[in-house]
Amino acid sequence: MIAKFDYHVPATLKEACEMKQEYGSSGVIVAGGSDVYAKLHDGNHRYDHVIDIKKIPEMKGIEWSEQEGLSLGAAVTHHEIERHPVITERYQVLVQGVRTVGSLQVRNRGTIGGNICTAAPSADGVGPLLVLNSECVIHGIGGERIVPLAEFFTGPKRTVLRSDEVLVRVRMKNPASRYGGAYFKYGRRNAMEIALLNISVYLEVDDDNKTCTEMRIALGTSAPTPIRVHKTEQYFIGKDLTDNEAVAKGGDLVIEEASPRSSWRANSNFRLTLLRQLVPRTVKTAYKSLIEE
Ligand SMILES: Cc1cc2nc3c(=O)[nH]c(=O)nc-3n(C[C@H](O)[C@H](O)[C@H](O)COP(=O)(O)OP(=O)(O)OC[C@H]3O[C@@H](n4cnc5c(N)ncnc54)[C@H](O)[C@@H]3O)c2cc1C
């Protein structure tokens, strides 16, 4: 049974930030509620105030332009993202990621902002946003600040958000007109499974169609927070992506940058073994998506 709480629906960012500040640890921001209400149901969590931010105009809507790129309201659902025509055409790696979240019911409720702010190392929306070099628009009582998504997480379930701050939007520039992208989620089941690990890849190649000029790789459940693996990315620059041996070597490097923990789902060594195999495989899938387009 859920303990009684007061339900607040702020109409503006200012009201939401003031409420968050005022209620402190006795309050919680809620968007889709797929995490928050599940926690309230488990009986181990209790909040006296639930602050529902879904009605705030700045948190809604998907905006896109050739000049500015893509801007997602924090309250945009996974399902809105996966069926948006521009996103399905230009940001396939993001669509691949959000499509693996829970079930259609969860994707209909769950928001991209909630996925980010939960700060779970396994979040399926976050890796694709990391390889798309996204930034977070954050609002607090003192105004707005922009934080790169790569700097948003400070630890498992912890973020840079201050006691009066909410995430308002996630923005990213347009990817190159020609790029390869792939998302791979490893879990024991195909549906309703939190990732044992996940891998997001974005890459670009030279005019010869095989020499890597840009590589971005993000890992989930491979460190206390979702991470980019910059040394491994750097290794790929200038490599021939049709050279299987060279691509496989990226797997040897990535395990030096990852630090997955052991949990009841899988131990650390197993996750490292998976990463060594699956990172090169995901790079190849991303490369294929580019040359077969
Ligand atoms: C059955 C089930 C299956 C799931 N499967 C997956 C899965 O496969 N992959 C996956 O990644 N996730 C999964 N989830 C987790 C969850 O559904 C997603 O993370 C979802 O995107 C959370 O969004 P939400 O809007 O429902 O978050 P909420 O529950 O509303 O909020 C989550 C957290 O973020 C905070 N928050 C939300 N919005 C903001 C904001 N704008 N500013 C500041 N703080 C904010 C809240 O205070 C809370 O701490 C699953 C959940 C359930 C219940």
Image (cartoon, rainbow, N blue to C red):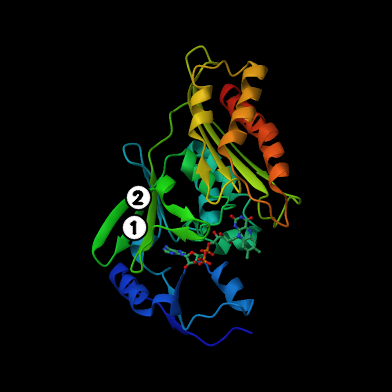
The answer to whether marks 1 and 2 mark residues whose Cβ atoms lie closer than 8 Å is yes
Please give left or right for residue 28 compared with residue 39 in the image. left
The residue closer to the viewer here, 122 or 64, is 122
Q: Percent from the top left, x then y, of residue 150?
A: 43, 45
Q: Is residue 5 placed above or below 124 in the rendered structure?
A: below
The outermost residue toward the bottom is: 4
Please give left or right for residue 107 compared with residue 178 in the image. right
Identify the residue shown where x is 53% and y is 47%: 226
Q: Percent from the top left, x then y, of residue 251?
A: 64, 29
SS at badge 2: strand
Please give left or right for residue 177 compared with residue 97 in the image. left
SS at badge 1: strand
Mark 1 C-beta closer than 8 Å to ligand 1: no
* Within-10-Å neighbours for mark 1: few <14, some 14–19, many 20+: many
Identify the residue shown where x is 65% and y is 57%: 102
The outermost residue toward the top is: 208
Q: Percent from the top left, x then y, of residue 116?
A: 48, 56
CA–CA distance in space, label 1 to label 2: 7 Å
State the residue position of label 1: 138
Q: Is residue 4 placed above or below 256 in the rendered structure?
A: below
Where does ligand 1 appear, by image quarter? Answer: bottom right
How many tags in the picture? 2
Name the mark on residue 189.
none
Quadrant of res 39:
bottom right
* Within-10-Å neighbours for mark 2: few <14, some 14–19, many 20+: some
The residue closer to the viewer here, 248 or 17, is 248
Identify the residue shown where x is 35% and y is 76%: 19
Name the mark on residue 147.
2
- Give the residue type at disc 1: Ile
Quadrant of res 200:
top right
Quadrant of res 35:
bottom right
